[in-house]
Image (cartoon, rainbow, N blue to C red):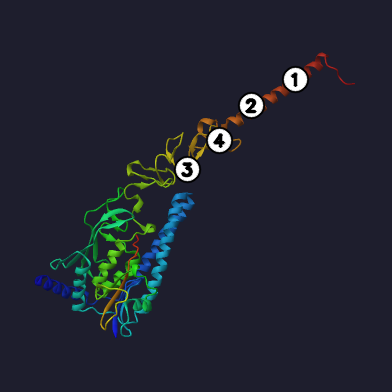
Amino acid sequence: MKKELKNDYRAAVDILQALQGVPTPKAMTALDESFNQCRRWRRRLELANARNWKAAANDSADRLGGALDILRMRSTHAIDNLTRQTKPHLEPTETSVYRDIEGLRGEFEHVTIDRANQRITVRTSSISLEYVELGSFEIFLNWKFIKETSPYDVLAVEPNYPSSNHSVTHPHVQGESLCEGEGSDAIRRALDEGRIYDFFCIVDHVLRNYNPDSAYVQIEDWNGVSCKACGDNVDQDKVVGCCKCETELCLDCSTSCDSCGDRFCSECISSCGCCVDDVCQMCLKSCNDCGDSFCNTCLFEGTCDDCISKQNEASEEESRNTVQTVAAVHAICDGKATVPA
Amino acid sequence: MKVLLISNDAGGYAHHVEAPDNTTVQQMFERHVGTFHADSYLIRVNRQPAAADQPLRDGDRVSFTPLKIEGAI
């Protein structure tokens, strides 16, 4: 026990030394990242609209909305920070950092200090989001890099990867990096001020929340993929992507094109104007006469059956008229017809 | 009395504030953060759990950390 207290105090001294010379928090960096996110999603939305990819456009619009929301929030934080920079900055002391380590031991079950590697590790209790069990996470703070942008890693103890992506362990953790979202400014501020107790609490709370508008993998797709039409959960290897807009669907909600055999969502499949077979927009051709859309088998040399029938009727009518005219002329010539005086 | 007030909401801040003697945790919250929602915040006094009606003492460290902090990509 005495040894642990001594170790904690020495770690507090080390952390304080690492903290010395910490620059003023740079809220503007987060703001720049948000601008870039908004630009990225706006470009994707424009592209999806230009190509008429409805599902992709809807998705991009949702994500742009989320990015704009974060930009608005970060703008507020940036204004707050500019205001607060004029106020005195909290200066950590050896005692305050030591008390933080003590506090962590009360707040979390597993807290380890590795002075050789200048690392303090906290293990969260088990985390479950929307009934998906993600297990515990270890948060490693490398105090040697405490002044850097991201001096910590987040590692799943027993990862429950989503079936679609094995580099993701949590909707907001990829590799060992947490995307802090709303927590970014508070995390940076806590680290800059040496409030490591608050830092770990904030990270723990970010891990316990789920933001569906901005997740590497949506939690409903964790154990498969949610069919965008009926909402059923489908195994990753059984999911069907619409060949036009890439919307993910179950087999029942996708329709096979009777011409090319590719599968499409209900918005991207059409039907032949004659045989009413399901045909994709790539396989549909316009009739040269009426302009309606038909499958290849219902067109003969670019013309639909109806137009061919009409053409045939017209030519038969024309033939009949010609025959009648010729017969009439012959009758006159033979003197069998009455010629008006 | 002087209390170290920490709010880990939004941008996060920590500064010393003057408060009347016997100010409770809830009063401190309402004065500096907003309407009191004990179930939406992790409330700690000197890094220990605290009740809403706990009176604060000179030199206390009070922290309010929201339970809902959403991550993002």
Image point (39%, 73%), residue name: B35
In the image, residue B33 sits, relative to residue A280, either above or below, namely below
Chain ID of residue with mark 2: A
For mark 4, does the 10 Å Cα neighbourhood hold few (<14), some (14 to 19), or many (20 or more) residues?
A: some
List x then y, in percent, for residue A252.
42, 39
Residue sitting farthest toward the right: A341
Where residue A28 sits, quadrant-wise, is bottom left
Image point (25%, 82%), residue name: B59
Label 2 and label 3: CA atoms lie apart by 36 Å
Q: Which residue is mark 4?
A: A273
Q: Are marks 1 and 3 on the same chain?
A: yes
Q: Which mark is residue A326?
A: 1
What's under tag 3, amino acid-wise?
Ser
Chain ID of residue with mark 1: A
Q: Which residue is mark 3?
A: A266
For mark 3, does the 10 Å Cα neighbourhood hold few (<14), some (14 to 19), or many (20 or more) residues?
A: few
Q: In this rendering, which labeled residue sits more in front, label 1 or label 2?
A: 2
Where residue A119 sits, quadrant-wise, is bottom left
Q: In this rendering, which labeled residue sits more in front, label 2 or label 4?
A: 4
Q: In this rendering, which labeled residue sits more in front, label 4 or label 1?
A: 4
